[in-house]
Amino acid sequence: MARTAANGKLKVNFNQNGPKPEDMTKCTPNNGEKTGPRTNVPSRQPRQESFEQAPMYVAVLTYLGFGIVTLFGYFRDFLRAVGLEKCHLAQERQEQKAFVPLYQDFENFYTRNLYMRVRDNWNRPVCSLPGPVFDLMERVSDDYNWTFRLTGRTIHNVINMGSYNYLGFAENNADFLKTVADKTLQYGVGVCSTRQEIGNLSIHEDLELLVAEFLGVESSMTYGMGFATNSMNIPALVGKGCLILSDELNHTSLILGARLSGATIRVFKHNNMQSLEKMLREAVSSGQPRTHRPWKKILIMVEGIYSMEGSVVRLPEIIALKKKYKAYLYLDEAHSIGAVGPTGRGVTELFDLNPADVDVMMGTFTKSFGAAGGYIAGKKELVDYLRIHSHSAVYASAMSPPVTEQIIRAMKCIMGKDGSTEGIRRVRQLAENTRYFRARLKEMGFIIYGNNDSPVVPILLYMPGKVVAFAREMLRRKIGVVVVGFPATPITEARARFCLSAGHTRAMLNQVLHHLNEVGDALCLKFSRQKFSSRPDLFDETDFELHS
């Protein structure tokens, strides 16, 4: 960041030829607003988040369970080494032993001895519309999950509690999809060219205008892949000599984009404003390592809703810190756009903030809109810059026409531009389902994470054996769930992640809750000792570590 001698303000340029946003002024809280502890920043909404810690014996038994499984893994590796057990994994041929090994046994230890034993709980083949209910193809394994075979039978009417179909737009209603069918007949299903060549269709430009209007910003640009929207655009915004401050629970696409950029990366504790402010203060006062030159840019990267924790970003406080220290803010709304806010416009609407205060707004169409792809939105100069410098814009094939039309018709439905109230009804139904489901789980005694407004609801299972038993028992009761464990989560925090949808009826939710109550009792999963609590290692403002 370049400091001017005249007034001491910080000016940041994305590139010498790129956009030059206006100087940011110091933000002070308005009268009557609550301020976060030990930070002079406003808090416009109470933190309604729960991160209760499990009893100590649960953590001890979890570590013990992993220890036992690991010991058996080494024993099985020994049996394979002496030829008493067949090894199903790929290995180098004998004549290749002198070469650099392609397969590292130790690196594959977890996959070989832990994941393979339980992988029947993932990658289950769906053979119907993945709506609120779906059908699964039954499969069995004769060799402890190394291979599977289909039995020819179908498991019908499984309640889908794992898809990101927040507003229920992943549907096959012929009346709703008529415009999508018409656009498919008009344009076909593929473009086979980048938008900078001959793949720029009129509906692509219509979609970008609609996204900008929906978000309340100047301009937007859409991409065919949500993951690449992050990983390929961040390197176009920052580079060597820039600093990225990233939340420790950010998605892999954000992490990959940050690494590809070549910028210096520092990680602050999840949603911890004191940790973030200390890093910002140190970055502005000390500058770059060794040379102490000012950083060219400082970019704060956060998510709207964190998909593993169900927590919501503390956006008002982050915006205040961004303005105070003249940094930029990159907001990933993959899980929050369409899912929160009175009219589904994401966390800026949830906190009643001006979208212009967010420098780079990113989101995906793969969740609330039942489609594919992503977008970047903000000032027109930012979007124009990315049209030229973004790898996703220059090299990727243009978005498929029927997918584009699906996004347009879903967004118009939410905005009421289709002449109906169906969109706002779905937004309100999702909010109602979320509050109801979370409240009932707390009453039952489960430990759940996240914000009361978040449709992502993690239920903590902790022990590896319970994770497997929970997933299998729920499927036996015709409820499809997603279970997640180490290394995707901390080793002591394996969980089942439920995703609510506007398509879920109250009867469906009651059926799921009934079975959850029974399974929770049978597997002893109700670890909660109090109704509401906070998680100190994530939110205690006086207890944090800095990572570089």
Image (spheres, rainbow, N blue to C red):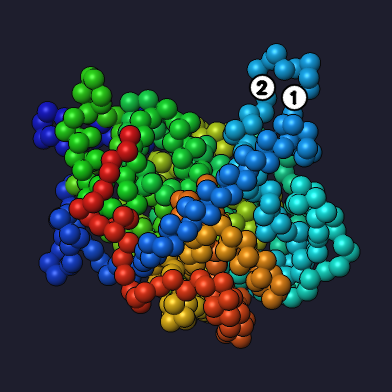
Q: Nearer the viewer, residue 275 or 51?
A: 51
Name the secondary structure under disc 1.
loop
Q: Residue at x 52, y 59 (%)?
A: 463
Relative placement, left or right, of 449 versus 277 is right
The residue wearing badge 1 is 92
Real-space CA distance between mark 1 and mark 2, rounded to the nearest whole angstrom: 7 Å
Mark 2: amino acid: Pro
- The percent position of residue 363, horizontal first and vertical second, equals 49, 53
Q: Quadrant of residue 227?
A: top right
The residue wearing badge 2 is 101
Q: Nearer the viewer, residue 349 or 487?
A: 487
Relative placement, left or right, of 236 versus 134 is left
- Nearer the N terminus, badge 1 or badge 2? 1
Relative placement, left or right, of 353 versus 419 is left
- The percent position of residue 193, horizontal first and vertical second, equals 69, 37
Q: Quadrant of residue 161?
A: bottom right
Q: Which mark is residue 280?
A: none
Q: Residue furthest top?
A: 98
